[in-house]
Image (cartoon, coloured by chain):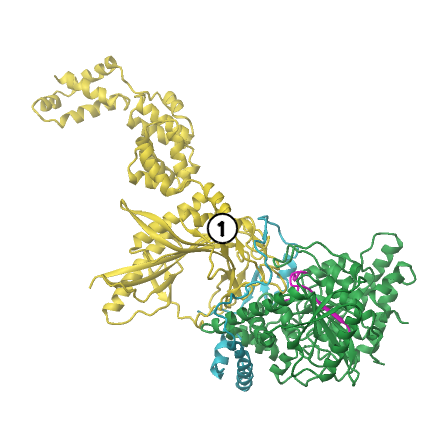
Chain colours: A yellow, B green, C cyan
Amino acid sequence: MEFEPVIGLEVHVQLNTQSKLFCSCPTNFGAVPNTHVCPVCLGHPGVLPVLNKQAMENAIKCGLALNCSISLFSKFDRKNYFYPDLPKGYQVSQFDKPLCHKGHVTIVDTGVEKIIGVTRVHLEEDAGKLVHAAHGADSGVDFNRGGIPLLEIVSEPDIRTPDEAYLYLTALKAIVEYLGISDCNMEEGSLRCDANVSIRPKGQKQFGTKTEIKNMNSFRGVQKAISYEIERQKDVILSGEKIVQETRLWNDDKGSTFSMRSKEDAHDYRYFPEPDLVPMVVEQKYIDTLRENLPELPFPRMHRFIEQYGLPEYDADILTGDKAFADYYEQCASVCSEYKMISNWMLSDLIREAGARKISFADAPVTPKMLAEMISLISNGTISGKIAKIVFIEMFDSGKTPSKIIEEKGLVQISNPEELQKVISNVVAQHPAVVAEFKAGKEKSIGFLVGQIMKETKGKANPQLVNTLLREALG
Amino acid sequence: MNLFSKTAAELLELLKNRDISAREIVTSVFNRIESVDSKVNAFAQTDKESALKQADAIDKKRSAGEPLGMLAGIPVALKDNLCRTGYRTSCGSKILSSYKAVYNATVVQKLITADAVFIGNANMDEFAMGSSCERSIYGATHNPWNISCAPGGSSGGSAAAVAADETILALGSDTGGSIRQPASFCGIVGLKPTYGLVSRFGLIAYASSLDQIGPLTKDVYDSALLLENISGYDPSDSTSIKQNPFSYTSTLKESIKGLRIGIPQEYFIGGLDSEVASHIQSAIKLLAECGAEIIDISLPHTEYAVATYYIIATAEASSNLARFDGVRYGYRTEESSDLHDMYFKTRSEGFGDEVKRRILLGTYVLSSGYYDAYYKKAQQVRTLICRDFENAFQKVDCIITPTAPSPAFKISEKIDDPLTMYLSDIFTISVNLAGLPGISIPCGFSSSRLPIGMQIIGKPLGEQTILRCAYTFERNTPFRTMKPTLE
Amino acid sequence: MAFSEKDVDYTAALARIHVSEDDKKVFAVQLEHILAYVNKLNELDTQQVEPTAHILPLKNVFRPDTAMKNPASDAAVQQAPYFNDTFYRVPPVIE
């Protein structure tokens, strides 16, 4: 039997506001535990929340970027449950009137565009962090994170493969980063993802029983966990058993999911409108202004790259997947019109060399101006592509400009026919046997001769010119 | 006459003329507490030393000619659910018996600015859940008019302290009548302001959409005076009304000629004590003689108010009281095997029966499958109750009703019958559901010499009107001067 | 709707309150009594009535996004019944 997976993702994004959602405590990561706290976010008796305006604005921006409808009337609700990291015994969240709903994200899967629906985007407060100790010992709670604004972005069950899930997350992350509203760092927990996974026989309309997978800490982890879960569900069904609706935790080391088997009672969150907060009522004009001021987003930018720079979709997709990367590209492209060559150098050499040095491309000593200059030097024939590889690495190590490196190292390409002819006659004279082979019709032998000429000129010979002159010499 | 038996206005006059010092007032009040509180038990805690220090600081300021706040040197008692930095604020509950507030409630901050002198925290029903002030870890408070009677609740400590002259001013909180009903039982003035007029920041919540802080005082003038010192917009409370400060004392003496007073027929049927009914009728007659126009009105959904209230209040309470879990402050059970066990033991040991009962009821009405039938239904009926008032206020400027269906009942008389206890709030609850201001003032005494209260309900932000009406009534009756005999 | 001892169990578990067997019987009877009274709301047809969300016509109450360390931060943390190593301590969470 062939199965079709049905996947929905619930992503939590921590907003990078200066202060928390309902109090003025700072939000920066890495502070000493329980120092970024106050009576309000610790849920002391008698305190009241007051909404951070920037958090609401960021949530609406995100909704707009995800093509959502923005609710003109929205409110907060209390989600009631007990957990030691939840100071008030309820989380202030949004239930039936989320800020944003009905949007979508476009992903590009091996050249094919697909639309993934976004059910809703709502604003809520983060919980603190529970630190589990060794077996039997007390657990610790740090409330620094408690009360930081969180966006919950819920997708429609439109995702069909683990790869699509990965691409959706990448696209979502890119959008949020373009907006500048979150650090999107999965390791620091500023982006978190849970997955709802079910499978059904291909062709069946009705959804199968789903499981909720938690505890993934990277996009690859999400991809792997979903793959594992799909296979597990297939095995369960094929062995004649039923899928149990439950929450399962992903164990990255073991590469498997396991049931939480929690003592926790049935989830009965007893949502009701938060009486301590008043509704958010926004005007269309306000939304329009926010929309007009949105930055260009990854997907439209990709299409512009294809149009404007004549790039293949593959290049444009990767370049625009990261705002800073795309900005780098455009800085190069503003001074050098070898658009495809810029893309090639960025996608291969820049990424590779930065990776080898374990730094971000943004921290590389090679500035867009330097890369553009180097590419211009290739295109005007000053240096060969081969020499450029040397120049590039030198730029990376020394931070010197390409012209300076070429000058210092005497790397200018030899394009003087007389100078080259001398080298060619020498090489031809030294290798009579190879020359004979070539004349007898062994075309490949010319490669050896070119190699020898390059060796003599330390790679500086203009390859096209060598080729022409050598063939002339061999008559 | 002893200083403790005077009103804030009288004392302020004496202080201004330098006839007395703040220290003398505080000393007098504490002498009174020492002589009668063993009978009344109005306080959860008092702090004489601190009060004298505050008084001395104010006396010093006065003699140095420094500017002074409007309540400089006047003793005030806080209900035990108002946070004051460094002081135990326990809501009469074991679960907060060790909690020391780490910040000042906005009203406390305002009273500090006004140079009032804090003398201690008044007793209350645990978490303000009660109408008799019997449910407190500090024991029951007794009605100064008859110590075998309850002072009403939940601000019973505040009301009894004012009635027994153990303080000059007191603050209470009112969720379903918790200021007005004890004021009525104790023969004093209790005002519940319009929802949002006084900041709730620092008031330990019972039911957030209903709670309001208000004054309990010896007379109407003091009520207006205290209100003008605690009201006003507060950016820390999202439900605070952006309202300019208003001098409620300045308009008290204006005539009530032409004031249209509504009498809702639904408040004068079955279950109303006949003595209460006749005193309210006489009061209405007197107001008519003062020039008010008396108009019969109808508030048709009155009979649904108690049911509506107990759904909404308990639902909110079940959530508001979830934070008391033994993790961050307050009581935690001595021993527990795991987290689950810790939660259950802490909360079961920390809360009293009535609090548990209301948490269970509130949890139930919000739980899966019942939300629409109870919580949503109640909020719909609440809309109908609000509309009743809106319609009535098209025709009248204020509404007069009895504050409670009877004078004070005996201590422990209703403690085992929650529903009967709930019904003693029947006349005060609608006002909270509609967010309106209401004041209770004494309008007579029963044959057994227990005070009877009259409630005047105003339009939203109609405090000025109800205070003026109350003042006129008070100045034309002798009840203000009557005191319980406790000696 | 009747309120049974089972309902007491369910709500008490949700509310993290332990109710003894004796109390359970009393609570069930009392709550049943209260709910019977509360059911009088069903006499009213409220199909066309908006529920009251807020009594005040307030909307859009915000604070600006400025961070500030709260002066009561230390005092607040010191209220913890169990605290060490900069963490609040709770009994082991069993999952």
Q: Is residue A448 visible?
A: yes
Amino acid under disc 1: Leu
The residue furthest top is A418
Query: Magenta residues?
Result: B187-204
Residue B195 magenta:
yes
Q: Give the quadrant of residue B165.
A: bottom right
Residue at 35% over, 53% down: A117
Residue A45 magenta:
no
Q: Give the quadrant of residue A460.
A: top left
Give the image location of residue B58, x and y in percent: 84, 58
Q: In terms of secondary structure, what is the magenta stretch mainly? A: loop
Viewport quadrant of the N terminus of chain B: bottom right
Q: Is residue A380 left or right of residue A20?
A: left
Q: Which residue is mark 1?
A: A15
Q: Chain of mark 1?
A: A
Vertical placement of A334 versus A209: above or below? above
Residue placed most toward the observer, A130 or B431: B431
Vertical placement of B186 versus A101: above or below? below
Viewport quadrant of the C terminus of chain B: bottom right
Give the image location of residue B391, x and y in percent: 61, 66
Q: Is residue B60 left or right of residue A127?
A: right
Vertical placement of A470 versus A48: above or below? above
Q: Residues within 10 Å of mark 1 (few under 14, many from 20)?
A: many
Q: Is residue B335 visible?
A: no
Residue placed most toward the observer, B41 or B389: B389
Residue at 33% over, 65% down: A210
Give the image location of residue C88, x and y in percent: 56, 63
Give the image location of residue C8, x and y in percent: 50, 80
Residue at 70% over, 83% down: B273
Callout 1: helix, strand or loop? loop
Q: Give the quadrant of residue A343.
A: top left
The residue furthest right is B19
